[in-house]
Amino acid sequence: MATNPADTPNTRNTPNLPNTADHPGPPSTPLYRRLARRLQERIDAGAYPAGARLPSEPELSAEFGVNRLTVRQAVAELERAAVVEIRRGVGTFVRPPAVRVSIAVDPRSQRFDLGSVQAALPEAGQGGGSRGADRGDGEFVVAAPPVTGSAQDAEAARQLGREPHELSRVDSVIRLGGRARAASSYWVPFGPLPAELVRPGRPGNLVLDLARAAGVELEYDWRAFGAVGADLADAELLGVPPGTALLVREGVSCTPDGTAALYVRRRIDGSSARFVLHFRDR
């Protein structure tokens, strides 16, 4: 039975994809991976800037002298590396650079917990600017689910030194650059929470709002970092496939006398954000 060359893996060493000092790798490196590396180099050099549409499969196939299956495999490799986004029926587009979520670590000046929205949304948070607000950026309430004694509720109770039934919870999403970037859950040892504060869709800075509702000032006690795969709820909220790597930042904030007053667990799309810890004044 005849085969379609476009669907047959191309294993020949083409003139357009040499193994040279500029394109390192053993001769056994698969052709699709060498093509992916060449495309990555073009993206890094700015030939395909963020948001740009890559040439089509036929165009790349003709330019590099490879079949379309090789192109498809190379693009899939770049998608796995979060370099490009494949929009079915539209094309393949270069992802923007990772959003830098900066957390300044300076015990002399960063003792007070002002909420991560301040760092995550610089355009909206600095000088009263409105660019972020124009894109719908900010933190928004999603829900105020009852504390039922789930594993997460039990951990929050343990960290706050309370029983689960003594806690109130509110969930939010942080939007940045026009899309959801982080899902947060907050637990506090008081309640019920004001109805307006937990109204779904309400914008604000929940750390500051919860502190005001409790009539306290919050300070950092501790923060920890980890990673998980997105469960179904977080995948839907963040618009990512289930199992996507999420950065997790969790911790406790306390009152000035050291009483634990808030536990937070934030899950962040690991393909679009990272934390940068600054240890010196800037």
Image (tube, rainbow, N blue to C red):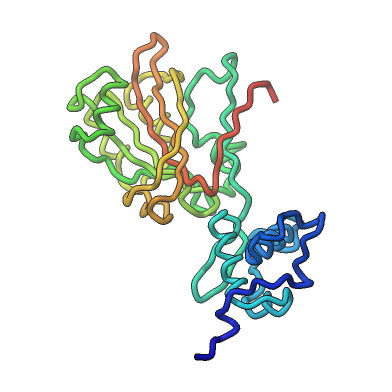
Residue visible at 53% across and 57% down in the picture: 80
Q: Which residue is the extreme one toward the right?
A: 21
Q: Position of residue 250 (x, y in %)?
A: 41, 30
34 w.r.t. 141: above or below: below
216 w.r.t. 74: above or below: above
Q: Position of residue 58 (x, y in %)?
A: 64, 80
Name which quarter of the figure residue 202 lies in: top left
Residue visible at 60% across and 33% down in the picture: 276
Residue visible at 77% across and 71% down in the picture: 16
Query: Image check: 79 left or right of 159?
Result: right
Q: Quadrant of the C terminus?
A: top right
Name which quarter of the figure residue 172 lies in: top left
Query: Image check: 273 left or right of 43?
Result: left
Numbered label tally: 0
Q: Nearer the viewer, residue 54 or 187?
A: 54
Q: Which residue is the extreme one toward the bottom?
A: 1
Query: Image check: 17 left or right of 263?
Result: right
Q: Position of residue 139 (x, y in %)?
A: 44, 42
Q: Nearer the viewer, residue 187 or 27?
A: 27
Q: Nearer the viewer, residue 42 or 74?
A: 74
Q: Position of residue 8 (x, y in %)?
A: 57, 78
